Image (tube, rainbow, N blue to C red):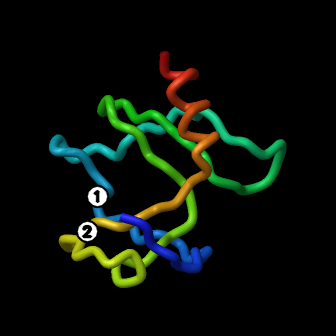
Amino acid sequence: MLYRSPVTNQPLTVVQETGRDGTEPQLTFVTKLCGGGSCPTVYRTDRDTYVVQGYTVTAEAAGLDLPAGEQLVEIPAELLAEAVKAAG
């Protein structure tokens, strides 16, 4: 599905703050494309999952119906490729 939507720099609302055991996820930096400052970034968690920092895209603009607690995040394709290499 192709969509055209302006991305925003709105902060994401953290919904899943704790794991099933009540602990907060521990993040480990994986990769980012910029040299400094804040930019789209990929982190690995101690839960064997990934957290992605990127630009929010509204479900409405993308033509999707998301369940409560989920959000869409846009990141550069190059960042995803670098994250796969780093995780390899």
Disc 1 residue crowd, few under 14, some 14–19, many 20+, Cα 10 Å: few
- The mark closer to the camera, 2 or 1, is 2
Residue type beneath disc 1: Gln
- Determine the residue positioned at 47% across, 62% down: 73
Image quarter (top left, top right, bottom left or bottom right) of the N terminus:
bottom left
Dot 2: element: loop
- Determine the residue positioned at 51% across, 39% down: 43
Residue type beneath disc 2: Gly
User: In the rendered image, which quarter is residue 15 located in?
Assistant: bottom left
Q: What numbered label is drawn on residue 29?
A: none
Residue receiving disc 1? 16
Residue furthest front as drawn:
2
- Determine the residue positioned at 28% across, 51% down: 18
- Please say if the residues under marks 2 and 1 sit with CB atoms less than 8 Å apart: yes
Q: Position of residue 61 (x, y in %)?
A: 42, 82
Q: Position of residue 13 (x, y in %)?
A: 41, 71
- Determine the residue positioned at 55% across, 31% down: 83
The image shows residue 43, relative to residue 36, as above or below, that is above
The image shows residue 58, relative to residue 82, as above or below, that is below
With 1 as the anchor, is 37 left or right in this view? right
Number of marks drawn: 2
Disc 2 residue crowd, few under 14, some 14–19, many 20+, Cα 10 Å: few
Residue receiving disc 2? 69
Spatial distance from mark 2 to mark 1, Cα to Cα?
8 Å
Q: Position of residue 67 (x, y in %)?
A: 18, 71
- Foreground residue among 64 and 28: 64
Marks 2 and 1, the one that precedes in the sequence: 1
- Foreground residue among 55 and 45: 55
User: In the rendered image, which quarter is residue 86 located in?
Assistant: top right
Dot 1: element: loop
User: In the rendered image, which quarter is residue 68 located in?
Assistant: bottom left
- Foreground residue among 57 and 45: 57
